[in-house]
Image (cartoon, rainbow, N blue to C red):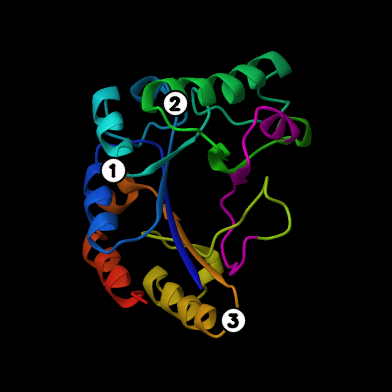
Amino acid sequence: MKIIATWDDGAKQDFRIADLMEKYKIPTIFYWPCALNKSQNLTRVKQFLNLKECKEIAKNFTIGSHTYNHLHLKKEIINEEQAKFEIFNSRKFWQDETGQSIDTFCYPRGRFSIEYKKMVECAGYKSARGIMVGKLDDGEDPYYTDTTVHVGIKREEYKELTWLEYAMVMFKQAQEIKNSTFHMFGHSWEIEANNEWKNLESLLRNIQI
C-alpha cells in the first residue's frame, strides 16, 4: 500500500501541516497557486504563505502547480490564451523559485475542460489531481487522479460517517488490496477553520505502516 497526502492553496497553516507530515513521515505534495495572496476564488483563506515561506517548505517537500491565479480551467470561464498562461507559466514559476522539476498539477476545485486537460499534458506535467474521493488506486488516467478522502470537512460521500471515520474505513480497505493507494487531500485553512487538527493527527497516528 502506498500512502500520500496532498494539500492545496498555500495558506499560512501549511507550515503546521508540513510539521505533521514530517513528524509522521507521510509523502506529501503541496499544490500552490503562484499569485498566493492575490489568487482568485480563495476568499476563505485568511492568510497566505509568502514566497520566502514557500521556498522554506519546498526544501523538504514536493511542490505541484495549482495554476497561476487559481482560476477554474473551464472554457466558459477563461479562454485558451489565459489557460495556457495559468498552466505553463505556473510550472515555470515554481521551477524557477524552488529548483524542483514541477511534474504534478492540481485543477482548482477539480474543474477543467477537456482541451485544457490536454494542455496540462503538453506543458510537461506527468500527472494531475482532481477532488473526487473514495478511490484506492491511482486510476488509469494520470491527468485526472482521484483521492481517497478529503480531510477536515463533511462530504456527502461519507454518508453518516465523519470524515475521520470514513478515512479509517477506507484505510482498512486499502490494507486488504494489493498495490492500493491511500490518498488524503485537504486544505490547511479548512483544518484551522473547522478545528480539526486533533482529528488530523489522530488519522496520521493510525495509518502508520
Q: Quadrant of residue 105?
A: top right
Residue position marked by numbered label 3 in the rendering: 177
Q: Position of residue 101 (x, y in %)?
A: 50, 33
**Vertical relation: 177 (above or below) 143:** below
Q: Is residue 109 visible?
A: yes
Which mark identifies residue 94?
Answer: 2
**Vertical relation: 190 (above or below) 42:** below
The Cα–Cα distance between marks 2 and 1, rounded to whole angstroms, is 17 Å
| The stretch drawn in magenta includes residue 209 | no
**Vertical relation: 73 (above or below) 153:** above
**Vertical relation: 43 (above or below) 199:** above
Principal secondary structure, stretch drawn in magenta:
loop
- Crowd band around label 3 with a 10 angstrom C-alpha radius: few (<14), some (14–19), many (20+): few
Mark 1 is on which residue type?
A: Asp
Q: Position of residue 59 (x, y in %)?
A: 29, 37
Mark 2 is on which residue type?
A: Trp
Q: Is residue 43 left or right of residue 57?
A: right
Give the extent of the magenta segment.
Answer: 118-138
- Crowd band around label 2 with a 10 angstrom C-alpha radius: few (<14), some (14–19), many (20+): many
The Cα–Cα distance between marks 3 and 2, rounded to whole angstroms, is 35 Å
- Crowd band around label 1 with a 10 angstrom C-alpha radius: few (<14), some (14–19), many (20+): many
Mark 3 is on which residue type?
A: Ile
- Indicate which label's residue lies in the foreground, 2 or 1: 2
Q: Are marks 3 and 1 in contact (CB under 8 Å)?
A: no
Q: Quadrant of residue 50?
A: top left
Q: Position of residue 82 (x, y in %)?
A: 64, 16
- Choose the circle earlier in sequence order: 3 or 1: 1
| The stretch drawn in magenta includes residue 132 | yes
Q: Are marks 3 and 2 in contact (CB under 8 Å)?
A: no
